[in-house]
Image (spheres, rainbow, N blue to C red):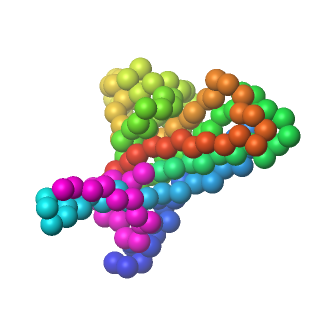
Amino acid sequence: MRKLLILLLATLAPAPALAANQVALDNSVFVERVTTDASGKQRVLLEEPKVVVPGDRLVFVLNYRNAGGEPADKFVITNPMPSAVRFAGAGDASPIVSVDGGKAWGALDTLSVIQPDGTRRPAQPADVTHIRWAFQKPIPAGGSGKVMFRGVVK
């Protein structure tokens, strides 16, 4: 059982994101825990995952920094969705997603999935295989920021 948990944790860390130009990326993953104090007030904590179980909510954070001497134009981050995790949104950000391994991209509500019988059905969060952010403005030399997305352990 312990070996299974370690293997699951290894699959939760996203593969290195792909970026153009000289932009350095750093990925982190956290488990979102809700605690209640003595007065009944709830607090949301982000913790490093030691053990995760189905249903745990995860937060993936991708920090980026332009390490080059020039602005990074047409900057794109593409991150595969860990197979053990169901996509649960990206907050206020507007990434596009793929449900077919990165062949086609779009907003989730515009995509569909081919069924075994050849019919199509609307794509759902569990179908997401990749997430992509395409920056509309160049990132200045030395500029940095972060994007994030959420998932739920399957």
Magenta stretch in the rendered image = 41-59
50 lies above or below 22: below
Q: Residue 66's quadrant in the figure?
A: top right
Which residue is depicted at the point 37% across and 70% down? Answer: 51
| Residue drawn at x 41%, y 20% as measured from the top left | 110
**Residue 5, placed above or below residue 23:** below
Q: Position of residue 67 (x, y in %)?
A: 78, 46
Nearer to the camera, 49 or 42? 42
Q: Is residue 85 visible?
A: no
Q: Is residue 132 magenta?
A: no
Most extreme residue toward the top, as rendered? Answer: 110
Dividing the image into 4 quarters, which one contains the C terminus?
A: bottom left
**Residue 23 left/right relative to 132:** right
Spot the residue most to the bottom: 2
Quadrant that contains the N terminus:
bottom left
Pinpoint residue 112: horizontal percent, then vertical percent.
Answer: 40, 25
Compared with residue 140, is residue 144 higher up or lower down, i.e. above or below?
Answer: below
- Residue for point 51% across, 50% down: 61
Q: Nearer the viewer, residue 107 or 58?
A: 58
Taking the image as shown, residue 116 lies to the left or right of residue 10, namely left
Residue at the (57%, 33%) spot, across then down: 133
In the image, 98 versus 134, the foreground residue is 134
Count all numbered tags in the image, as a single digit.
0
Q: Position of residue 88 (x, y in %)?
A: 36, 41
